[in-house]
Amino acid sequence: MLTPSSGAVGLGRALLWASVVLGLALTAHSEAGGHVPPVAAIALLGALLLAVAAGAVRRQIRWPGGLALAGLGQLGAHQAFSWFAGACPSPLPDGGAAHGHLTAPAAGVYGSCAGAAEPAVLAPEMLAWHVLATVVAVALLVGVERGVWLLASWLVRPLAVEPLWLPVVRRALVPAALRALPGRVDVHVAPERGPPSSALVMRLAA
């Protein structure tokens, strides 16, 4: 039986969610001026999104759940892209000269802090692009979800078996003369007569 929550259909839905959310996150991040991380980092993030989506597609995803899933995916993707692309913490007031020992730990946490790196704080333009990507992803994928579940319900619907057409036989009216007799019938039977008496024979002989 076709079940959208498991099997090949469930895996396909999870792949669709992960790929669309990740692809729109990459587009929004690059359009807002962010750096694109290496391919290995993108593949790792896609695997994480696929694992989360595989647990979410056990039921039909509607707008509230879709916004939560896509919004968390966009936020996680932005943080991962910024880290892998070399996001740095806010610069120190003295330029970090007096605290040079903090440069190595910061580079280890935020990636390679080099050149024109991205700021760690989410800029308004970046936020707007990721919000737009979230809405577009949910609008697209929720519509696909409705179509998949509607198709699955139509395929597993039991076939309606129509009864065979049979000719209608009407009951003929029974005439009153042929109707059954009442349950109780009084039948009078005359008693049998015996031989004539001797007095009657003598009278006839006289």
Image (cartoon, helix red, strand yellow):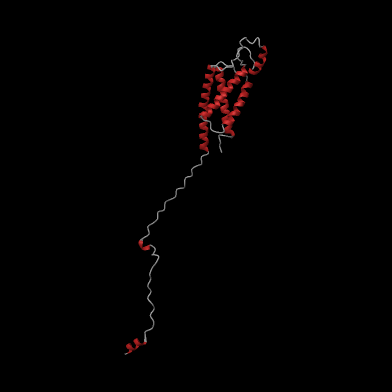
Image quarter (top left, top right, bottom left or bottom right) of the N terminus: top right
- Residue at image position (37%, 85%) is 197
Instruction: Tell me residue 162's x, y (percent).
Output: 47, 45
Q: In terms of depth relative to the viewer, which is nearer, 167 or 186?
A: 186
Location of residue 19 with respect to 158 vertically, above or below: above
- Residue at image position (59%, 33%) is 8
- Residue at image position (68%, 13%) is 101
- Residue at image position (57%, 25%) is 19
Location of residue 72 with respect to 150 vertically, above or below: above
Furthest residue to the left?
Answer: 206
Q: In terms of depth relative to the viewer, which is nearer, 80 or 101?
A: 101
Quadrant of residue 55 in the image?
top right
Quadrant of residue 44 in the image?
top right
Quadrant of residue 49 in the image?
top right
Image quarter (top left, top right, bottom left or bottom right) of the C terminus: bottom left
Q: How many labels does the image show?
A: 0
Instruction: Tell me residue 147's x, y (percent).
Output: 51, 32
Left or right of residue 102: residue 72: left
Instruction: Tell me residue 74's x, y (percent).
Output: 56, 23
